[in-house]
Image: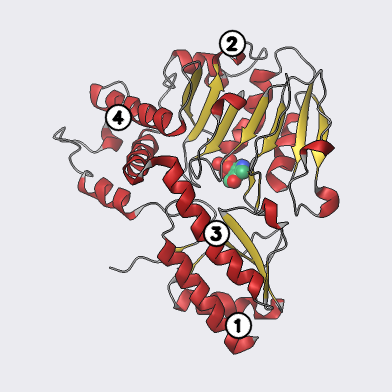
Amino acid sequence: MTRIVNFSAGPALLPEEVLARAGDEMLDWHGSGMCVMEMSHRGKEFISIAAEAEHDLRELLAVPAHYKVLFLQGGATLQFAQVPMNLLAGRGKADYVITGEWSKKAAKEAAAHCEVAIAATSEDRRFRCAPPQDEWRVGADAAYLHYCSNETIGGVEFHWVPDTGAVTLVADASSHILSRPLEVSRFGLIYAGAQKNIGPAGLTIVVVREDLMGRAARGTPTVMDYKLQADADSMLNTPATYSIYIAGLVFKWLKQLGGLAEMERRNVAKAKLLYDYLDASGFYRNPVEPRDRSRMNVPFTLADAKLDDAFLKGAAERGMVQLKGHRSVGGMRASIYNAMPMEGVQRLVDYLKEFERRHG
Ligand SMILES: *Cc1c(COP(=O)(O)O)cnc(C)c1O
């Protein structure tokens, strides 16, 4: 068996140890005689799996006691609507910071529910940076401020937590959650689709401060009401059971490695290896302001776009896939999430060198 080096932005690679363990437990989870997929979500086996996953996630992120952790469905995209439906609480306005494709989509969806004020944007700089805090205009009357803390497509990451004063801070952290420690208490709500840095698609994680719940807009579907989901331990209806199980194994894997501080150390080293090479070469280019570059998603272009196909073909021949950039920006993108080992990044850098030697 040969495992490919998968640079997909999502669904993305998972730790091999996690997949191997899931394989071992496939037919008989812990003597239950069942696969986790076959279990009742109301049974004691699955209840224990979900409780342990929540416990481990709370420990990894050091989630304070007055926050709820929800295991939901519908992806980060559903949160684009669910956040305003739950957090507006009768107010007519929310602030959005626009730093790329995902924050734009979030703002567009919110506009169906309230007036959207753009508190800051980097669109005038072609989304190549995170707008510095002194440019932000946070509205005192905004119900919350939403931003995307890591733009998966553009490769722009906030390496700082914005200060929004009394206004509730909401983050779409889909593509870098668990890649570094996070000061949860600075946020009102953090959400993330699982398929980037946590586990399989189908699971969305929401961490929300308790006092923000319970004021959903009239007509909010029950499964989209944070308070009702929290009261039902995220099991108002059937949750994404197998995705929660795999996410739980990923949490154990992270704990075993030493938690998020250790993960951050590894991610910094991986990103440095790749960016240092891109910057030193005259052939490849990453367009993002160095201080705002993502450790998770690294877009880059070749000196001549006519070489793109040859580059991708050569990569595939060397066992490296999903390097094509998002259709909206072109070029290449290497996503190097938690589960990407240093050896995978080294293999990519070796190939970048080889390709540059041949075509540069
Ligand atoms: C992938 C992604 C989304 C969309 O996630 P879905 O689960 O497909 O809805 C939203 N925001 C960010 C930052 C993402 O990376």
Mark 4 vs mark 2: which is more N-terminal? 4
CB under 8 Å between discs 4 and 2: no
Residue at x-position 30% and y-position 23%:
47
Amino acid found under the numbered disc labelled 2: Gly
Q: Which residue is mark 2?
A: 214
Mark 4 or mark 3, which is nearer to you?
Answer: 3
CB under 8 Å between discs 4 and 1: no
Q: Which residue is mark 3?
A: 271
Q: Quadrant of the C terminus?
A: bottom right
Residue at x-position 64% and y-position 19%:
86
Mark 2 vs mark 1: which is more N-terminal? 2
User: Badge 4, how many Cα within 10 Å: few under 14, some, many 20+?
Assistant: many
Q: CA distance from mark 3 to mark 2?
A: 41 Å
User: Badge 3, how many Cα within 10 Å: few under 14, some, many 20+?
Assistant: many
Q: Which residue is mark 4?
A: 49
Mark 1 vs mark 3: which is more N-terminal? 3
x and y, in percent, of residue 60 in the image? 42, 34
Which of the pair 154/110 is nearer the observer? 154
